[in-house]
Image (spheres, grey):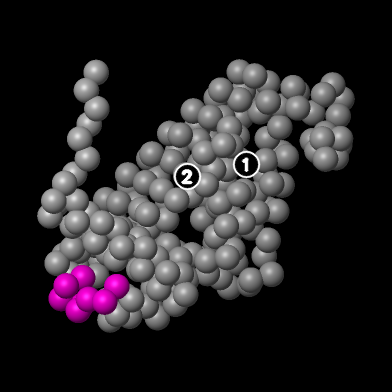
Amino acid sequence: MTTPRKPRGPYRKGLERRQQILRAALEVFSEHGERGASLKEIADRVGMSQAGVLHYFDSREELLLAVLAERDALDVEATADVTSPGEAVARTAAHNARQRGLVDLFVTLSAAASDPDHPAHAFFTRRYADLRERIEDGLRKAQERDEVRTDVRPDHMARMLLALSDGLQLQWLVDPSVDMAETVQAFNLMCLGPAVTGDGDTPEAAARDRG
């Protein structure tokens, strides 16, 4: 079996430069949100001109979507050790509470992407399909282990969990006192199966016993 060769020369440097811009953009959008972030500030942080940044990203819209994709990739990496989809979403929610600007960017773009002609429409269509499939698969496997209730279809629970996560982000932007992670955990408790709750135990009692 041959080992894939790493990119070399100008191509490798181009990839590294693009990643550098992307990380700077993540920082700027995290700090300022979609409306407060400027291409100039991103360019300044990497020591480039705005035209130089747009050499790697054809438009501001493409950069915005790349930032969201990178945010998702980092969330997946941060939850790689979690086997429960609900726990992964709860951990991601807790992380999001420290990145108000990126939550603002996500909520703004996801709402606009409901228009089929919007540049972000295809991105969000793929994103929701991929996330729903992964969550549904995890829930189905958990049902087979009796860790998740079986009287609700896993595809329905997956959609509810995604809707809860996205809706909480909007509520949190309006009212920062909303505890997104705690609310997701409450949903997770309602989904527990007999292997976790035990015979006759309520989900809340099982959670206390485990804690």
Look at mark 2 in the image and give the residue it sits on. 77
The residues colored magenta run 46-53
Question: Residue 103, position in %: x, y?
Answer: 48, 65
32 in the magenta segment:
no
CB atoms at circles 1 and 2 under 8 Å apart?
A: no
Residue pictured at 47% horizontal, 75% vertical: 31
Say few, some or many: other residues with alpha carbon within 10 Å of mark 2 (under 14 / 14 to 19 / 20 or more).
few
Residue positioned 48% across, 49% down in the render:
75
Task: List the residue tagged with mark 1.
Answer: 87
Between disc 1 and disc 2, the foreground one is: 2
Amino acid type, label 2: Glu
Write down the quadrant of residue 176 in the picture.
bottom right
Disc number placed over residue 58 in the picture, else none: none
Q: How many marks?
A: 2
> Residue at 35% of width from left, 53% of height from top?
69
Question: In the image, is 160 to the left or to the right of 21?
Answer: right
Asked if residue 174 lies left or right of residue 118, the reply is: right
